[in-house]
């Protein structure tokens, strides 16, 4: 006899297949790449649309502002609205914005489209908690880690791919190609993702946002994990803001192609995601976190051993790999920890975590540019070292009860 309870059980996803996990990982990478395509193309875009040289930075900044707003205002909707429909709606917004950006010939429409690209790209941060909700408890960290590896590959590959496409065609083509990819991705996710209506659907939107402030004030695990990752991503952003300037300078004298090849080293960091997930599932969150924090600090120290030689370039490349490994390690362990605070809170928790994480990155970029202009690589790398060191100092103050809650 079929009872309501047995019917509900039969409709509940049994977990995530390897194919579904791969699809969600690929989706995260392809969507996240939209945030980074403009970074190597900002100069040509500004010239073509008539944006003054001193305002070129707006091309990247406006997209980041849109993403930051989306993290706080749209990602929490994953705890309120049916998840599959919400994710595909965000992808539709990104698609329209990409087309608008490609068609733009003046600053106003292009910057408006860039803002919308940032807003819609938060679909990534809706997919991750969605996957966490579908995954069984015993392998949740592994699933999150596998999906985050796709995200990291997308971030690191976006810049060289954008440069390659623009080199053989134009920057407009980059946006059109991505829009076509988004159409196919949206259709695939609509047909393949299961439906999920969150239990918090009874809340109003205003109540949902108000509850986020309460979560931030009352959840020490969220506070700590966000603080660690803000420092980590600040160091990450500082490194990747400054190294192109450092490599192009007199110490190394690399050209555009050489710097693009160097950037590919960061893709190796993606292998840390599944490793971090598996360590988290085994109750090794704390040692994995310590390893991630120490790795980022060590990466900056490595670059001080030698300067302006082939050996120095080798060390810098190894530092890039180690830094990306460390940042990814703490990111995955952090997400695994905050997702354990409640299944019905995961989208809100993820929105808060990523918004603070993203703010740290913005601060790191600004600090890096200032430091390199003021004191060269030495000053920039010392600030980079201080950031994970600060996070590690906070990490050492964890109480016994906080350690138990993450194990």
Image: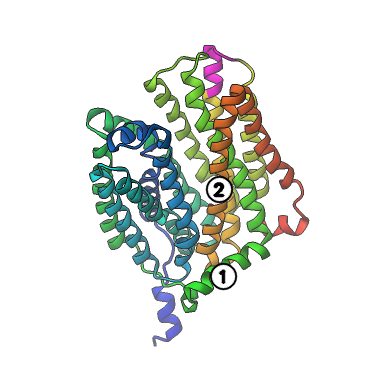
- Residue 144: where, in percent of width, then height? 49, 53
Q: Which colour scheme is used?
A: rainbow
Comparing 44 with 191, the one in front is: 44
Please identify the dominant SS of the magenta region: helix
Comparing 386 with 366, the one in front is: 366
SS at mark 1 in the image: helix
Point out the stretch of residues depicted in magenta. Answer: 307-316
- Side of 259 where 101 appears, left or right: left
Q: Mark 2 Cα within 10 Å, few/some/many (few <14, many 20+)?
A: some
Residue corresponding to mark 2: 359
Residue corresponding to mark 1: 210
SS at mark 2 in the image: helix
Comparing 290 with 43, the one in front is: 43
Above/below status of 57 relative to 228: above
- Residue 124: where, in percent of width, then height? 42, 53
The reply to whether dot 1 and dot 2 touch (C-beta < 8 Å) is: no
Mark sitting on residue 357: none
- Side of 292 where 245 appears, left or right: left
Above/below status of 353 relative to 33: below
């Amino acid at each position: 006899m079929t009872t309501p309870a047995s019917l509900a059980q039969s409709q509940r996803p049994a977990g995530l297949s390897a194919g579904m996990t791969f699809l969600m990982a690929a989706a995260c990478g392809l969507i996240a790449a939209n945030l980074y395509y403009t970074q190597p193309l900002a100069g040509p875009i500004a010239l073509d649309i008539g944006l003054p040289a001193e305002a070129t930075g707006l091309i990247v900044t406006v997209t980041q502002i849109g993403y930051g707003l989306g993290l706080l205002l749209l990602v929490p909707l994953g705890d309120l609205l049916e998840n599959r429909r919400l994710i595909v709606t965000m992808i539709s917004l990104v698609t329209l914005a990409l087309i608008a950006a490609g068609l733009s010939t003046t600053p106003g429409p292009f910057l408006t489209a860039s803002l919308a690209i940032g807003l819609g790209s938060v679909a990534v941060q809706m997919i991750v908690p969605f996957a966490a909700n579908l995954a069984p408890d015993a392998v949740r960290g592994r699933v999150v880690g596998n999906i985050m590896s796709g995200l990291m590959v997308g971030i690191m590959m976006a810049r060289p791919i954008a440069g390659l496409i623009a080199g053989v065609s134009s920057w407009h083509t980059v946006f059109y190609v991505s829009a076509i990819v988004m159409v196919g991705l949206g259709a695939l996710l609509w047909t393949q993702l299961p439906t999920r209506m969150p239990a918090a659907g009874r809340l109003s939107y205003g109540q949902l946002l108000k509850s986020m402030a309460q979560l931030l004030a009352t959840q020490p695990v969220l506070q700590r994990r966000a603080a660690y990752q803000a420092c980590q991503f600040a160091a990450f952003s500082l490194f990747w803001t400054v190294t192109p300037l450092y490599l192009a300078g007199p110490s190394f004298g690399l050209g555009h192609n050489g710097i693009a090849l160097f950037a590919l080293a960061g893709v190796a960091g993606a292998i840390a995601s599944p490793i971090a997930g598996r360590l988290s599932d085994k109750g090794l969150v704390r040692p994995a976190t310590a390893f991630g924090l120490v790795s980022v600090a060590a990466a900056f120290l490595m670059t001080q051993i030698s300067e302006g030689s082939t050996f120095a370039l080798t060390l810098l490349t190894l530092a890039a790999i180690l830094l990306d490994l460390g940042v990814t390690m703490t990111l995955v362990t952090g997400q695994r920890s905050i997702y354990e605070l409640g299944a019905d809170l995961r989208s809100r928790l993820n929105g808060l975590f990523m918004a603070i994480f993203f703010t740290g990155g913005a601060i790191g970029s600004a600090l890096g540019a200032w430091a390199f202009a003021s004191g060269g690589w030495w000053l920039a790398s010392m600030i980079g070292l201080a950031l994970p060191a600060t996070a590690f100092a906070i990490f050492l103050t964890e109480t016994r009860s906080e350690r138990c809650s993450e194990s």
